[in-house]
């Protein structure tokens, strides 16, 4: 499972403060701890507070790379901020551009731009593409799958390998009732998305979004993750420091026969997934 | 979710001892605690130690019924032991006959006998039917589904409502590697079994069997349960006293939109599922 660790994000108070103080140590400690916990990638998001988002992204990337070589996932709604991160990133180990919709309100073909940026970054650069388009997040399962199909077909058209694509079907908070985008519908969308291409694109979710504002965040995240893995989910932007969550990942992989059972399967997983 | 609580079973040391000592209190305490934990049914299994299995089953049933009215699930491989339990049971609240294969080596049409016994017990009596036949437990997914289809069609033939049928696709211990009956294959079987009839039969599993002999029993049980509920599993013979497991049940039902989210959804579930 490709775990993209979510903690280096300016939305968290400690990271926001570290950015304001230009305090590398807080960032580097988070990079180290998440890597040890089994993160495959470290998400890097400057948040909304920093005045100079591009400069902040570069500073975060440089600070992290001073201390560890875990691949990064450059996370911004602004392509220019991701582009700034790409200038500083060592893409040899891999890098993810997070994220792009299919297209935008103004008919901006933003996915094309991301494919160009990823190609410039090198053969190990991947893209997270959201199942949303100029009309926003679809209110039903079928349109999610339809947009995912368009994303996959556009990638193929451009000769961009589907294995470099992460499709994110967008989970919404359970606390905000919405009949059309219930978790069960997202699972059904996943079931179809996994068969859109062969080899299949990766599938990821911003897992913590599901439990936003709830009293049982880890439990809700864990249960949904266990439900989604048999439907083809092979990646998640998630809290790698949540040991219970990482144990559910290990157990799911064991049950789905991606790791054989041994009495120490949790430890084996933690040491081999790094 | 129909939770059939597993603890009143002569395979557990405390129950075995209570049976030997004819000590009702141990049994009644387990009945009370499991009911409070949210059990829909209490499984009753005399185990293998008791010399007089039929008499022991009756004594267990009578002891439990003195203290609570939770419906019982009479669990034995011997139809005569279940029949003995049925003589003592109050079937007005429901009762489950646990369990029968489709048929046996000697071509004994044992499912027919169970349907007869259930019909005699009254309209609220159900049957757990295992997806196995005279050849034993099938070594692949398709044969599990095929046997389930035969069970459903036999029930329909006899005018036995499919809602009175619990299909058990039989999970095997992960500790014993067997490529053909991996948990992923059982999930695929469930996906098909749920559409065998409309209204669908219930689906159940002997959940704890999966984690037999492992070092992480509750975790493995919990993760598989979360995976199986979206595939139509609506019942499990499980450890109702495992609070973490019951919380996964509540969270799964909430995510699958069987309960709306509220900050106290775990408590709400515990109090309404009884």
Image (spheres, coloured by chain):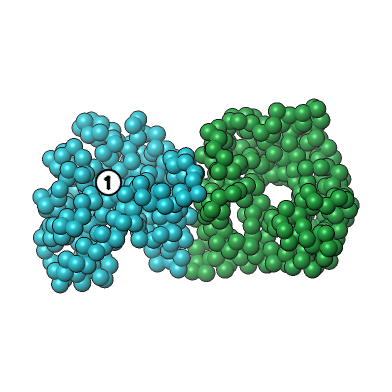
Chain colours: A green, B cyan
Identify the secondary structure beneath mark 1.
strand
Question: In the image, what residue occupies the spot 78% across and 48% down?
Answer: A48
Task: State the image coordinates of residue B24 (x, y, percent, origin top left).
Answer: 16, 66
B175 relative to B196, above or below = below
Q: In front: B49, or A108?
A: A108
Residue B263: x and y in percent read: 50, 49
Instruction: Give x and y (percent) for residue A213.
Output: 59, 49
**Residue A116 left/right relative to B121:** right
> Is any atom of residue B26 visible in this view?
yes
Q: What's the chain of the residue with tag 1?
A: B
Q: Which residue is mark 1?
A: B128
A143 vs B213: above or below: above
Q: Residue at x 83, y 52 (%)?
A: A50
Residue shown at 33% from the left, 41% from the top: B202
Up the image or down, A36 lies above or below A115; here it is below
Quadrant position of residue A36: bottom right
Picture quarter with the C terminus of chain A:
bottom right
Horizontally, is B77 left or right of A137 in the view? left
Numbered disc total: 1
Residue A41 seen by the camera: no
Residue B11 percent coordinates (x, y):
26, 66
**Is A191 left or right of A16, judged from the image as shown?**
left
Q: Nearer the viewer, residue B120 or B70?
A: B70
Where is the N terminus of chain A found, in terms of image quarters?
Answer: bottom right
Residue found at x 14% / y 69%: B22
Q: Quadrant of residue B157?
A: top left
Quarter-of-image position of residue B149: top left
Q: Is residue B79 left or right of residue A253?
A: left
Of residues B32 and B264, the one nearer the viewer is B264
Q: Residues within 10 Å of mark 1 (few under 14, many from 20)?
A: many
């Amino acid at each position: 499972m490709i775990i993209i660790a979510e903690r280096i994000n300016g939305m968290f108070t400690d990271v926001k403060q570290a950015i304001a103080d230009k305090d590398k140590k807080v960032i580097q400690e988070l990079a180290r701890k998440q890597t040890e916990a089994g993160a495959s990638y470290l998400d890097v998001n400057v948040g909304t507070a920093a005045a100079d988002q591009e400069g902040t992204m570069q500073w975060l990337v440089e600070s992290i790379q001073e201390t560890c070589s875990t691949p990064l996932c450059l996370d911004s709604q602004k392509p220019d901020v991701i582009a700034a991160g790409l200038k500083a990133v060592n893409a040899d180990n891999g890098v993810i551009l997070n994220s792009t919709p299919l297209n935008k309100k103004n008919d901006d073909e933003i996915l094309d731009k991301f494919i160009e940026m990823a190609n410039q970054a090198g053969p190990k650069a991947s893209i997270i593409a959201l199942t949303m388009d100029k009309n926003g997040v679809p209110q039903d399962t079928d349109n999610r799958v339809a947009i995912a199909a368009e994303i996959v077909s556009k990638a193929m058209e451009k000769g961009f390998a589907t294995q470099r694509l992460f499709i994110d079907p967008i989970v919404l908070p359970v606390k905000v009732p919405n009949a059309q985008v219930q978790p069960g519908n997202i699972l059904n969308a996943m079931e179809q998305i996994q068969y859109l291409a062969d080899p299949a694109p990766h599938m990821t979710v911003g897992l913590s979004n599901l439990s936003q504002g709830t009293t049982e965040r880890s439990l809700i995240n864990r249960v949904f993750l266990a439900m989604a893995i048999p439907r083809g989910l092979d990646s998640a932007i998630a809290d790698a420091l949540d040991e219970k969550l990482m144990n559910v990942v290990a157990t799911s992989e064991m049950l789905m026969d991606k790791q054989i059972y041994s009495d120490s399967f949790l430890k084996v997983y933690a040491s081999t997934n790094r």
